[in-house]
Image (spheres, coloured by chain):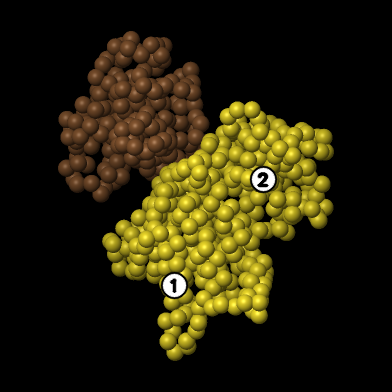
Chain colours: A yellow, B brown
């Protein structure tokens, strides 16, 4: 098997970054059914495999449902397993996502976030991410290609830990990250592999001396206990393991990740909360506002599941107005971030005024101008101590302004 | 922050050109970003690609930009799309065409009073690479007009970016880059 010499900084898009991380951790089985915009992840991986940079199996299947089913089988058999998908493919995978988490299989899924049809659209929004949020997976979010690379290592390390044994998704924005080339600081192959370490099977089906059963049926006698234990482990075991992995990664690379990322929040009076590339653009606006003496901060959600309740309450302690920016159509309610933030803050000391923005559906550009106007709303809300706008606004869409509640 | 917009047709190599440029500039220690609007993603469809170059980390991910340079690598797009969209007062245009700069401006009055340079990247590519792929020649023209990098070290870096291609094609690309560098007016 060959090793690859990487430059200290490679110009990679998010797909290439994710596929190199997958190469470096030496996955045993990738079962995949490619879909835009995640296609290059598994395509690149297949090339690495064909050129002897990886020892493993690439299984070409007939659908995303089969792709995740293949991953479930390979993971239960005792291998290190990963794949990638987007949008409609993710939607078709949903049934098997619940199988993977319920069977406690540490599969890594790179989700390149894309809109859901109809109308058909290949561009980036968070509809697929939101669709999978109750699926029992750990979910991490990348804001640029560097994050997409780094978070894959974190994902394998935490997911495969025997105290955790839960699958993990690494989300990145379709096109805005997946097809945007930027400098990525790399790890050499051995260093990257050793950070994650050898795969240690647990209850693997191919351990013929210790036969086990996977994928069993339980009715009202035991089903609830399985689900309760899964929730207990998500809520209590994942945070400390994630924090330990973030710490170890920072020691190795100098790159610091946190469950909730904060920028210009020490002095902030108002803050936007968002995910994906929007976090980075919002930081630029926040920097420009702070240079003018306007105390506007940014909060990025790094760990979507398990949702970091306590960190959220801590971060917003002294904030007067919060804007929750959701890149998915909530269809009949407020956005997920609004709901999660409200749930996190309702029993805390926070008196923050909270409102909701739906933006960027189907890849619609989120411009700095939009973010400036959001901060204007938030500053007005902070000053008034109550909502001065509707609870929910649609921004960046044609026609008369849409606002609700 | 330096911002560049490419006007191209899908299949002419604007994305490869933008990514190649980013790759080379990254090697000089600057921060880079390269992305594209794929539109309907059909070969021959009008599309745009973008570069950002900065001394510090690039945070901005909006697709919107006021470009410093606008590179047009298909001659007809000067007429069938608005290449002046979101321009600045000092935006520099480099347009591939068989016409002189003066003839081009007369044929497209929107370019009147702008900083416009012309070069025939299609002809250069056909005569050197043997295919009408005008992306690498445009990089040679951009270097001459912008002085963002020195031509010889650029060519050395570009050879590595094109590394997987046959040696003959790499050599032809180097000649194409140099010709566009010399011929842009």
Write down the chain letter for disc 1: A
Q: Is residue B149 left or right of residue B52?
A: left
The residue at the point 25 percent across, 49 percent down is: B164
In-image side of B4 versus A157 (left or right): left
- Nearer to me, B160 or A336: A336
Residue beneath disc 1: A73
Question: What x and y, as percent, mark residue B90?
Answer: 46, 19
Q: Quadrant of residue A206?
A: bottom left
User: In terms of sequence position, does the residue under pointer 2 or pointer 1 come before the other?
Assistant: 1
- Residue sticking out furthest to the front: A219
- Measuring 59% from the left and 33% from the top, which residue is drawn there? A396
**Gap between marks 2 and 1, in whole Å?**
37 Å
Quarter of the C terminus of chain A within the rendering: top right
Q: Which chain does tag 2 point to?
A: A
Name the residue at 78% across, 37% down.
A387
Foreground of the two, A40 or B3: A40
Residue placed under numbered mark 2 in the picture? A332
Is any atom of residue A349 visible in this view? Answer: yes
């Amino acid at each position: 098997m060959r090793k690859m010499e990487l430059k200290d900084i490679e110009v990679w898009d998010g797909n290439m970054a994710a596929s190199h991380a997958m190469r470096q951790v030496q996955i045993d089985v990738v079962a995949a059914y490619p879909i835009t915009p995640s296609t290059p992840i598994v395509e690149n991986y297949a090339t690495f495999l064909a050129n002897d940079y990886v020892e493993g199996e690439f299984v070409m299947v007939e659908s995303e449902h089969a792709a995740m089913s293949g991953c479930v089988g390979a993971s239960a058999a005792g291998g290190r397993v990963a794949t990638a998908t987007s949008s409609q493919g993710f939607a078709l995978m949903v049934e098997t996502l619940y199988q993977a988490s319920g069977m406690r299989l540490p599969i890594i899924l790179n989700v390149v976030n894309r809109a859901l049809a109809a109308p058909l659209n290949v561009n980036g929004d968070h509809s697929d991410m939101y669709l999978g949020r109750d699926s029992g997976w750990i979910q991490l979010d990348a804001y640029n290609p560097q994050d997409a690379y780094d978070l894959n290592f974190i994902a394998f390390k935490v997911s495969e830990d025997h105290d955790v044994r839960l699958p993990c998704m690494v989300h990145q924005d379709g096109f805005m990250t997946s097809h945007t080339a930027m400098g990525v600081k790399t790890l050499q192959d051995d260093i990257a592999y050793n950070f994650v370490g050898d795969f240690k099977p647990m209850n693997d089906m191919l351990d013929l001396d210790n036969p086990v059963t996977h994928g069993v049926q339980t009715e009202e006698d035991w089903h609830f206990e399985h689900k309760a234990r899964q929730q207990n482990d998500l809520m209590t075991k994942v945070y400390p393991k994630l924090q330990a992995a973030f710490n170890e990664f920072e020691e190795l690379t100098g790159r610091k990740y946190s469950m909730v990322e904060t920028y210009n929040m020490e002095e902030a009076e108002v803050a936007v909360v968002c995910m994906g590339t929007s976090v980075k653009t919002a930081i630029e606006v926040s920097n420009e506002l702070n240079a003018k003496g306007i105390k506007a901060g940014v909060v990025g959600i790094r760990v979507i599941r398990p949702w970091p309740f306590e960190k959220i309450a801590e971060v917003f302690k002294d904030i007067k107005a919060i804007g929750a920016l959701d890149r998915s159509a909530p269809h009949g309610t407020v956005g997920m971030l609004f709901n999660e933030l409200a749930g996190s803050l309702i029993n805390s000391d926070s008196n923050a005024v909270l409102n909701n923005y739906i933006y960027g559906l189907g890849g619609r550009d989120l411009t700095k101008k939009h973010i400036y106007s959001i901060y204007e709303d938030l500053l007005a809300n902070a000053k008034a101590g109550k909502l001065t706008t509707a609870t929910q606004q649609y921004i960046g869409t044609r026609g008369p302004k849409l606002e609700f509640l | 922050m330096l911002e560049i917009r490419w006007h191209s047709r899908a299949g002419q190599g604007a994305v490869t050109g933008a990514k190649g440029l980013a790759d080379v500039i990254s090697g000089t220690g600057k921060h880079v970003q390269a992305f594209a609007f794929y539109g309907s993603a059909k070969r021959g469809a009008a599309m745009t690609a973008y570069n950002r170059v900065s001394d510090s980390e690039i945070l901005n991910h909006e697709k919107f930009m006021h470009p410093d340079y606008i590179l047009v690598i298909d001659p007809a797009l000067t007429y069938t799309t608005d290449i002046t969209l979101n321009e600045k007062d000092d935006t520099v245009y480099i347009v591939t065409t068989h016409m002189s700069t003066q003839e081009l401006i007369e044929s497209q009055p929107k370019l009147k009073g702008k900083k416009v340079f012309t070069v025939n990247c299609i002809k250069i590519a056909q005569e050197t690479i043997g295919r009408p792929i005008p992306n690498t020649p445009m990089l040679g023209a951009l270097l001459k007009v912008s002085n963002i990098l020195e031509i010889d070290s650029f060519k050395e870096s570009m050879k590595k970016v094109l590394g997987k291609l046959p040696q003959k094609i790499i050599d032809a690309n180097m000649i194409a880059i140099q010709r566009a560098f010399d011929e842009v007016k």
